[in-house]
Amino acid sequence: MFTPPAYALVATDLDGTLLRSDDTVSARSRAALARAASAGARHLIVTGRPVPGIRALLADLAYDGLVVCGQGTQLYDAGSGRMLSSVPLDRDLADAALGKIEAEVGPVFAAVDQDGPEGRTLIEPGYRMPHPTLPAQRTGHRAELWEAPVIKVLVRHPGLTDDELAAAARAVVGDLATVTMAGPGTVELAPYGVDKGTGFALAAEALGLEPAGTVAFGDMPNDLPLFRRAGHRVAMAGAHAELRAAADEITLSNDEDGVAVVLERLFGRE
């Protein structure tokens, strides 16, 4: 008789969580995910990266399930290569939000992730990508960022910390956009009301699974909306203090296979 797993869904962030610092998934993590799958659990990637930024990784993992991308703005079917849903960020609102932020804290540097499965990441002069391995195209001036539909804006400040910039942005942006901190040097603006939690809910519904039956892994404040919907919340060692406070347990770091450690306890080892 089949015994259903304790958790039917394993939701993992990528950067700082499932991925090691060199942007790879370890053999141990792969084996742990395979063991969870053999026990009947589904793996759902929930990432701030847009679809083009993870396609090679999905192929390397032989991952053919659903993926929540772009801070919840995109739901992608890796098996069929189809975008199931996408929520663009109004470009006029995004430009207005940047203006409000700059009026509060002074000049910032911005980048955008374009909409669509082939969308590009565009960076204005002065913006430095937090992940050098991710492809980006430099523009000559900010106006070029708005030439095609976008899903989110990435913002950096030359002097403020990420926490300071995120707090200042939230104070002035209001309902123009959702402000989140996704990682070191990564404060982002997404469509208002859209986040990893809303994207996760869409994916769980599409899979016919209850969000409460999920064990979720993350490391940064952008994972908080995911944590609020999951049944069991696991923060990585070294995770942001906000996420640690919301977690049910703290595991080892991404470079120490923290995701695998928890999955081996829940689903066993091969």
Image (spheres, rainbow, N blue to C red):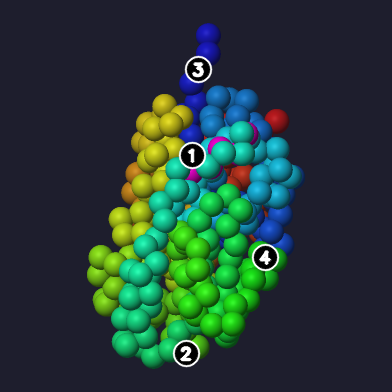
Q: Mark 2 points at which residue?
A: 159
Mark 4 crowdedness (10 Å alpha carbons): few <14, some 14-19, many ≥20: few
Q: Is residue 62 above or below residue 219?
A: above
Total numbered labels placed on residues in the image: 4
Q: Distance between the residues labelled 2 and 4?
A: 25 Å
Marks 2 and 1: in contact by CB < 8 Å? Answer: no
Q: Residue furthest front?
A: 147
Q: In which quarter of the image is the C terminus?
A: top right
For label 4, the residue is 135
What residue is disc 1 on? 84
Please give the residue where the numbered disc 3 appears in the rendered image: 3
Spatial separation of the CA atoms under disc 1 and disc 4? 23 Å
- CA separation in Å, label 4 and label 3: 44 Å
Q: Is residue 252 visible?
A: no
Q: Quadrant of residue 229?
A: top left
Categorize mark 2 by other alpha carbons within 10 Å: few (<14), some (14-19), many (20+): few
